[in-house]
Amino acid sequence: MPVETIQEADRLTPHLAQWMERYLKNKDLIHKRIKQIAVSGDTLTLTYADRTTSIRIIPQLPTAQQALIPFASATHCSIVTYNTQENFEAFVRDWETYAKFKRHFSIYFVNPFSKQDKLWVLFPSSHHAITEPAALKPGLITIASTVDYTTISELSTILAEETA
């Protein structure tokens, strides 16, 4: 991937972090289980009465090994990334690593500007346990199709227009 695209994706981290924070707060409005959300760089830390969840914001997925390093000591953890074709393909390519990582690991694919749903989420360990290997990619494509794909360039353009 060209350096410009990686830098462009990195500039989208604050937007994705803010969007995810709002999403989580809205999702928790009724149950009020989240005690605190702390934002530090590319990480959201959610504190509940009985656990802490670490969420890493990664606009453009690297290899699974690189993405999962910060979660070595976390029990509950998630990655939030944009719903791009490249991220989907990277996720499928590294499926085995994600699926075998941790039981309480999830990944969110987000497109805040989608005309359909805005995100889809998957717990790879659980999904791996119930899915036949031959059905994996077609099943993931079906789930992913509920959210429009986007590109890093498209997101950069939309956000530049919003802030202009």
Image: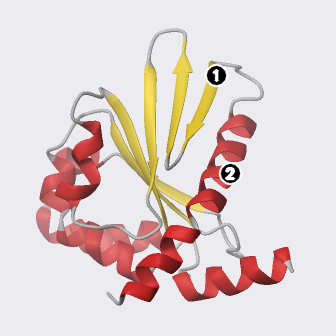
Q: Quadrant of residue 135?
A: bottom left
From the top left corner, tell me how far across and down residue 59 is, in percent: 47, 66
Left or right of residue 21: residue 54: left
At label 2, which amino acid type do we have? Gln
Disc 1 secondary structure class: strand
Q: Quadrant of residue 91?
A: bottom left
At label 1, which amino acid type do we have? Gln
Foreground residue, 129 or 80? 80
Left or right of residue 113: residue 68: left
How would you rate the neighbour count of disc 2 (Cα within 10 Å): few for under 14, some for 14-19, many for 20 or more? few
- Colour pattern of the rendering: secondary structure
What residue is drawn where x is 27% and y is 73%?
A: 90
How would you rate the neighbour count of disc 1 (Cα within 10 Å): few for under 14, some for 14-19, many for 20 or more? few
User: Of all residues shown, which one is farthest toward the top?
Assistant: 49
| Label 1 – label 2 distance at C-alpha | 15 Å
Q: Which disc, if any, is residue 51? A: none
Foreground residue, 95 or 9? 9
From the top left corner, tell me how far across and down residue 16 is, in percent: 60, 59
Left or right of residue 105: residue 12: right
Disc 2 secondary structure class: helix
Residue 107, compared with residue 140, is above or below; it is: above
| Residue, disc 2 | 18
What residue is drawn where x is 12% and y is 64%?
A: 133
Residue 114, compared with residue 26, is above or below; it is: below
Q: Which disc, if any, is residue 36? A: 1
